[in-house]
Image (cartoon, rainbow, N blue to C red):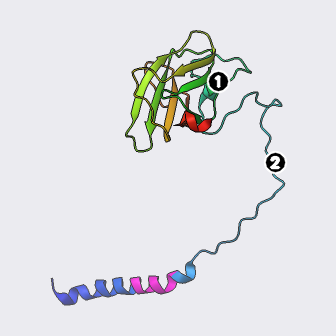
Amino acid sequence: MNWHNNRFPLSLFALTVSLGVTIAPSLVAQTQPLTTSSNVSIKAPGSDSPVYTVGGGSRHGGVCAADKVAGEAFGFQVLMPAYSETSKDRPSFSLQVPQTVATKVFLSLRDANEDYYYQTTISLPKAPGQFNFSLPADAPVIETNKEYTWFVGLVCNQALEPNDPTIQGVIKRVDAQLNL
């Protein structure tokens, strides 16, 4: 093909691009501020308030999906502060366990650098209620003046799953002499 035969389509393309560049800025959409009304009220269906509520990150209200829970029953909870101090080398944990299909809890304990990392499963009693346990004898002891993150999960099936209720906190071993 000859160069002269291609000049017309090339000129047409250049003209189209230059017109698009000069006309397009005038076609920019104008935005208007969105006005909202403060008189909007949303009412949930039904007239009763929920008996038990949980945070947005919680699932199933602290119970396994297969559990049949009475209306006012509370789910899986910790009965100690989320940040605790202990003088014991094997700390104790206190939980409230509902009537559940779960037969065990998963326990994980680690320090900030993950130099210390321990995990195990612990069998649950058959009756619901307060459940206390200590770090098992086969676990290494925790060091004084060091914080450890603990994690306890209610194992609803054969192994811990993302939807299973979990609780976590921090525990620090302190020198018993300093507390006197």
Residue 96 lies, in percent from the top left, at: 63, 22
Residue in front for this viewpoint, 101 or 173? 173
Residue occupying the point 58% across, 39% down: 178
Q: Is residue 35 magenta?
A: no
Q: Disc 2 marks which residue?
A: 41
Residue occupying the point 75% across, 64% down: 35
Query: In the rendered structure, which segment of residues is drawn in magenta?
Result: 16-24
Residue 136 lies, in percent from the top left, at: 45, 21
Residue in front for this viewpoint, 66 or 33? 66
Amino acid type of the residue that numbered disc 2 sits on in the rendered structure? Ser
In the current view of this chain or complex, which residue is farthest to the top? 126
Crowding at mark 2 (Cα within 10 Å: few <14, some 14-19, many 20+):
few
Q: Is residue 22 magenta?
A: yes
* Residue 163 visible in the displayed image: no
Position of 110 with respect to 133 (left or right) is: left
Crowding at mark 1 (Cα within 10 Å: few <14, some 14-19, many 20+):
many
Determine whether the residue tagged by mark 2 lies in a helix, strand or loop: loop
In the current view of this chain or complex, which residue is farthest to the left? 1
Residue 75 lies, in percent from the top left, at: 64, 24
Residue 70 lies in what quarter of the image? top right
Q: Main secondary structure of the magenta part?
A: helix
Position of 23 with respect to 118 (left or right) is: right
Q: Disc 1 marks which residue?
A: 75
Tell which tag, 2 or 1, sits nearer the viewer.
Answer: 1
Residue occupying the point 56% across, 79% down: 27
Quadrant (top left, top right, bottom left, bottom right) of the C terminus: top right
Q: Is residue 13 above or below residue 84?
A: below
Q: Is residue 19 above or below residue 107?
A: below
Determine whether the residue tagged by mark 1 lies in a helix, strand or loop: loop
Cα distance in 3D space between marks 2 and 1: 31 Å
